[in-house]
Image: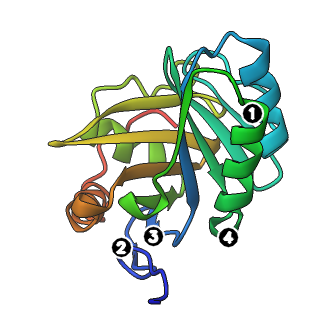
Amino acid sequence: MSEAVSALKGASWDGYVSVGEIGLMGMITLRGDLDSAAMRSAVASATGADMPDRRGITVSGENRVAWMAPDELMLMVPHGGVEAALAALHEALAGEHHLAVNVSDARAVFQIEGAGVREVVAKLCPVDMAPGAFEPGTIRRTRMAQVPAAFWMTDPQTVRIVCFRSVAAYVFDLLKGAASPGSEVGYPV
C-alpha cells in the first residue's frame, strides 16, 4: 500500500505573510440533523469539541468541528485518527439518519501567518475581513478567486484554508500572488 502524502508535500513561501501547506489532516464530512441530541453527543464523542454555532468552529486539542451548512459539519482530527473518529460517530449515531465520510485525501490545507493575513484573504474572497466582522472562532465557506474554499482564523494573525486537493497548486499560487511584497494595500489589521 502506498504512503499518504499531502497535495504539495509541505510547500511554503514567504512574502509579507508566510504561506504554507500544512500537510496531512484528517477530515470527515458529517451530515444529519445538527440539532439532535444524538448528533451533539456523537460530535463530542468523536472529537471532544462542542457543536459549533452557525458559521462557527470549535476546538478541542488537535480536533476541530466546523459548521459548513445547516445539515453539515467538517470534523478535523489528526490524519491517523480518522478511522477511530468515524467508528465513534457510527456507534453514537446508530439508528440515526446521517452520513459520515472520510474526505481527508480529497482536500489540501494551507496556513498563512503574519500581520497582513486579513488583507491577503480579502484580496481573494468576497468576505468582510475587517476586525470585528471576522474573528477567530468563525469559518467561511466561499470562493477563493475561481475555486471553492473554506477558511478560519486560529488567532488574529493566522488563517487556515481548506480547498479541494485538485486545485491545491492553483490556491498556493493565488496566495503567493496576494502575499507578494509590494502588493500591500493597507487593509486594516
Badge 3 crowding class, 10 Å Cα cut-off, few under 14, some 14 to 19, many 20 or more, is: many
Q: Amino acid at mark 3?
A: Gly
CA distance separating discs 3 and 1: 29 Å
Q: Amino acid at mark 4?
A: Gly
Q: Is residue 101 above or below residue 175?
A: above
What numbered label is drawn on residue 80?
4
- Determine the residue positioned at 54% across, 21% down: 55
Spot occupied by residue 155 in the image (x, y as percentages of width and height): 67, 44
Give the residue at mark 3. 20
What numbered label is drawn on residue 7?
2
Q: Amino acid at mark 1?
A: Val
Q: Nearer the viewer, residue 104 or 155?
A: 104
CA distance separating discs 4 and 2: 17 Å
| Mark found first going from the N terminus, 2 or 3 | 2
Q: Are marks 4 and 1 in contact (CB under 8 Å)?
A: no
Q: Quadrant of residue 142?
A: top left
Spot occupied by residue 141 in the image (x, y as percentages of width and height): 39, 31
CA distance separating discs 2 and 3: 12 Å
Mark 1 against mark 2, which lies toward the viewer?
1
Give the residue at mark 1. 43
Mark 4 against mark 2, which lies toward the viewer?
4
| Mark found first going from the N terminus, 4 or 3 | 3
User: Is label 3 in a helix, a strand or a loop?
Assistant: strand
Q: Are marks 2 and 3 in contact (CB under 8 Å)?
A: no
Q: Is residue 120 left or right of residue 160?
A: left
User: Is label 2 in a helix, a strand or a loop?
Assistant: loop
CA distance separating discs 4 and 3: 21 Å
| Mark found first going from the N terminus, 4 or 2 | 2
